[in-house]
């Protein structure tokens, strides 16, 4: 019995030694300079996307980018430098795309705001008993729904059409 206990303990020591030898005798490795630079680029790209209001205007793309970044971190922790690099590169590209989409949506939102303002002025001058007034109200509601769904271009179209009916 005693021999088996010693042999079992010896096996544990051998396994621990094997793990240490395979890991090069050190803890988790630090990223190389290229990967450190890529990680910094990912952080900067996320900051730019956030400042462009991507959490509101491009939430789906931002979420995908965050998932790619987390995957990069997970792969690095698993010591998969190539996989980690690929995931971080994907994250950087996705953050850049989220920033671009948010910037485009901001421009579209500004156009929709202007169309809604003009429509409201047309509505105030309109005769509420005119036959087209009710259709204009329907288009106004439709525009508001599209706007709330971040479909600003469609909202703009509806607001302009409603303004034309008032």
Image (cartoon, rainbow, N blue to C red):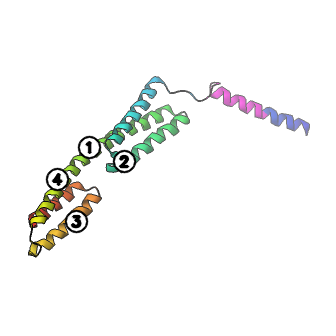
Image disc number at residue 142 = 3
Query: Comparing marks 2 and 4, which lies closer to the viewer?
Result: 4
- Whether label 2 touches label 1, CB < 8 Å: no
- The residues bearing labels 1 and 3 have C-alpha atoms spaced at a distance of 24 Å
Residue sticking out furthest to the right: 1
Q: Is 19 part of what is drawn in magenta?
A: yes
Q: Does the magenta portion include 164? A: no
Q: Determine which quarter of the picture holds residue 115.
A: bottom left
Looking at the image, is mark 2 or mark 3 earlier in the sequence?
A: 2
* Residue assigned mark 1: 103
Image point (24%, 45%), residue name: 104
User: Magenta region's main secondary structure?
Assistant: helix
Label 4 residue SS: helix
Q: Residue at the spot x=53%, y=27% of the render?
A: 30
List x then y, in percent, for residue 68.
43, 42
Q: Label 4 belongs to which residue?
A: 114
Q: Is residue 18 above or below residue 102?
A: above
Q: Nearer the viewer, residue 161 or 15?
A: 161
Q: Which residues are magenta?
A: 11-27
Tell me the CA gap for discs 4 and 1: 17 Å
Q: Which residue is mark 2?
A: 55
Q: Earlier in the sequence, mark 3 or mark 4?
A: 4
At label 3, counting other C-alpha atoms closer than 10 Å, the crowd grade (few under 14, some 14-19, many 20 or more) is: some
Which sits earlier in the primary sequence, circle 2 or circle 4? Answer: 2
Task: Of the two numbered discs 2 and 1 on the same chain, state the one appearing first in sequence.
Answer: 2
């Amino acid at each position: 019995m005693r021999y088996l206990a010693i042999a079992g303990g010896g096996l544990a020591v051998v396994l621990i030694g094997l793990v240490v030898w395979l890991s090069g005798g050190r803890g988790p490795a630090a990223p190389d300079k290229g990967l450190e630079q890529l990680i910094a680029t990912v952080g900067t790209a996320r900051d730019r996307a956030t400042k462009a209001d991507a959490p509101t205007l491009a939430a789906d793309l931002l979420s995908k980018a965050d998932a790619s970044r987390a995957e990069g971190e997970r792969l690095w922790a698993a010591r998969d430098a190539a996989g980690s690099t690929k995931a971080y590169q994907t994250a950087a590209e996705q953050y850049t795309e989220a920033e671009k989409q948010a910037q485009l949506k901001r421009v579209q939102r500004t156009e929709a705001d202007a169309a809604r303002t003009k429509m409201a002025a047309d509505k105030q001058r309109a005769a509420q008993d005119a036959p087209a007034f009710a259709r204009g109200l329907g288009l106004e509601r439709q525009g508001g729904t599209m706007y709330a769904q971040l479909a600003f271009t469609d909202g703009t179209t509806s607001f302009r059409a409603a303004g034309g009916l008032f």
